[in-house]
Amino acid sequence: MDFLQLILSGLANGCVYGLIALGFVLIYKATEAVNFAQGDFMMLGAFVCIGFTNHEYMGLNFWLAVPLSILVMGALGYLFNWGILRHMFGQSQTSIVILTIAMGFIIRFLAGAIWSHEPTSLEIPFAGQEVRSGGLVLGIDEVLIVVVTAFLTLAFFLFFSRTRIGLAMQAASQNQLAAYYMGIPVRRVHSLVWGLSGMTAAVAGILFASKGAIDPSTGLLGIKAFAAAAIGGFGSLPGALLGGLIIGLVEPLASRYGPPGVSQIAPYAILLLVLIFRPGGIFSQTQRKKV
Amino acid sequence: MRFVFKTSYDADISLFKHRAQAVWYGLLLLLVLATPLYFVLIGDAYLLGEITGMLILAIAGMALMLLTGHTGLPSLGHATFMAFGCYLNINLLGAGLPWLIAFPLSGLIAGALGTMIALPVLRLHGVYLALATLAMSILTSDFVVIAEPWTGGIAGAAVPDINIFGIEINRYSTPYKFYYLVLAVAILMVWFYRNLLRTPTGRSFTAIRDSEISARAMGINLTRAKATSFFLSATTAGLAGALFGHSAGYVTNETFDLVMSITLLLMIVIGGLGFIHGAFFGAIVVGIIPVAIANGRTFLSTTFDVNINVPGLESALFAFILVCFILFEPMGLYGRWLKIRTYFELFPFYRKDMFKRQKSYLKTDRVQ
């Protein structure tokens, strides 16, 4: 029973990592930019929602605040690409990596300046409620996380396979020039992908903040999400989720059954092992150019 | 306007392009040699310590510059190699080795260890390498705690003084000697680095940076060249770490953290990626920002009675400067200076796109 309980709470954590990784992979797949600030986007999304909901700030209704903060984060993602990243189009990946790392620092600072560095948690209407079934005790927030993640995955799957804009995004990610020739506005598609990823980050942030307290340095959690994305294979949406779940599950199990200190090391050790033995990740999608 | 006539093949790879350049660098050497005189005159060596710190950062920056700026491999884990160098130096000195042997040895062992760790991830490139080194950097602090018998763990370890043939050197009691020591190491490094770039090995690094595919087509053994670059870079970083330890006096598991790795990377980008000068310019910027912020704070609080006390302001300001550089001057401070100089050297003939790099848009262009 103890084991099952651990697995379930690990699952909920893993879903949050998976969602951050999802936003990260979305961007990588479509624009080949690596957003090292995705964790900070998640943190910002959580704080925007806190700013709307909590009584010491605006005190809006929770169900109104959630879509509002998702929209705000979507707009921020769109503007981020439109204002900054679009000008980097065609430059080396390294400079984009460095740029997004720097943006992460700035976001962390701004969040700290606006909402303070104290750990804050989101005031949710269903806090403390539990779901009991057969001796298992689950917080409703954990159940919600798993349900929302499953729903979002399905929605993304349908979006990319059924809608015109989703197909356009896939085309732009496969070959930018050919997509241009087919009349796809690649730049706008890129901005839309950034918006979408901002929204995903907001969802992840809201879920995370409803589960526990959040402070600006929580954005560093993004690093675990990168590990998740790399374990699953960059550029693979199911891979990102799977990687997130693996990390989420390994952490509580390692801290319960392993020697002390292992639970912090475990995710990165797995990452290094995956990178060494299967460099493309579990769902490998890398191509090689032969000389 | 200056015309440089090349009259021999060696002119292409000579250390100085023309005599004026040699004279300028000679003057610079004199200036850095004479700097301590000023502090002797004012009788306060505090700022000299800051300058020494900048020089150590510049050595670490050169290490990363070789890997990222000249071989094109991004590393987010150079603080790890610095930690290797620092702790090895402490232990070798503790084992009774003289500093003149312990110091280079700690760099070499750090380089060998770094290469051993890096070999499996060297097959990766770009983002994956960045991620692997990032993971390495995060794990460093944990491993320092685990390896407590050698590192002192969380409690930390004191760094012994330097002793060269009976001359005791300590950062606080003999700041001038320490400055000259660090300066000597820095100059040796620059000399080595400059010569490396003139050899086939150094040229192969640059070829890999510009295009792995064409480098392979020209018969460069990619893995070998990358491993060599990693070894040289990790060795230099190890030496910088050992000096950093001497400068800090006391190191704990939080000394060589992720922030340090990232700072190094941001530093060389601000200075100018792909130029040795860039490491020094970047180190100066990194050294000056905290001082400037502290001065700005006291100025605001004394004249306007405004107290700004926001944690993280330093790194945010630093990051903001970096974003501006990447957007508006991707070649960094040294690149800006190069452009200004070229403008005057070619006076009426400078064109706007002279330093423009070719962009790549297609995914197929980037698959390597």
Image (cartoon, coloured by chain):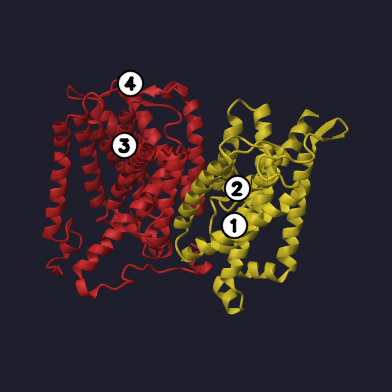
Chain colours: A yellow, B red
Q: Which residue is mark 2?
A: A44
Residue B268 x %, y % = 36, 50
Q: Which residue is mark 3?
A: B239
Residue plotted at (78% across, 28% down): A2
The residue type indicated by label 4 comes to Gly
Residue plotted at (44% across, 55% down): B323
Q: CA distance from mark 2 to mark 3?
A: 39 Å
Q: CA distance from mark 4 to mark 1?
A: 54 Å
* Dot 4 crowding, Cα within 10 Å, few <14, some 14–19, many 20+: few
Q: For numbered disc 2, what is the local secondary structure?
A: helix
Contact check, label 1 and label 2, Cβ < 8 Å: yes
Q: For numbered disc 4, what is the local secondary structure?
A: helix
Circles 2 and 4 on the same subunit: no
> Against A24, is A177 above or below?
below
Q: Chain of mark 3?
A: B
Please tell me in which quadrant of the rendered image residue B20 appears: bottom left
Viewer-proximal residue, B293 or A233?
A: B293
Residue B94 x %, y % = 33, 21
The residue type indicated by label 1 comes to Leu
Residue A36 x %, y % = 53, 50
Instruction: State which mark lies toward you, 2 or 4.
Output: 2
Label total for image? 4
Q: CA distance from mark 1 to mark 2?
A: 10 Å
Viewer-proximal residue, B201 or B38?
A: B38
Instruction: State which mark lies toward you, 4 or 1.
Output: 1
* Dot 3 crowding, Cα within 10 Å, few <14, some 14–19, many 20+: many
Q: For numbered disc 3, what is the local secondary structure?
A: helix
Q: Chain of mark 2?
A: A
Q: Which residue is mark 4?
A: B94
Among the two numbered marks 1 and 2 on one chain, the one whose residue lies closer to the N terminus:
2
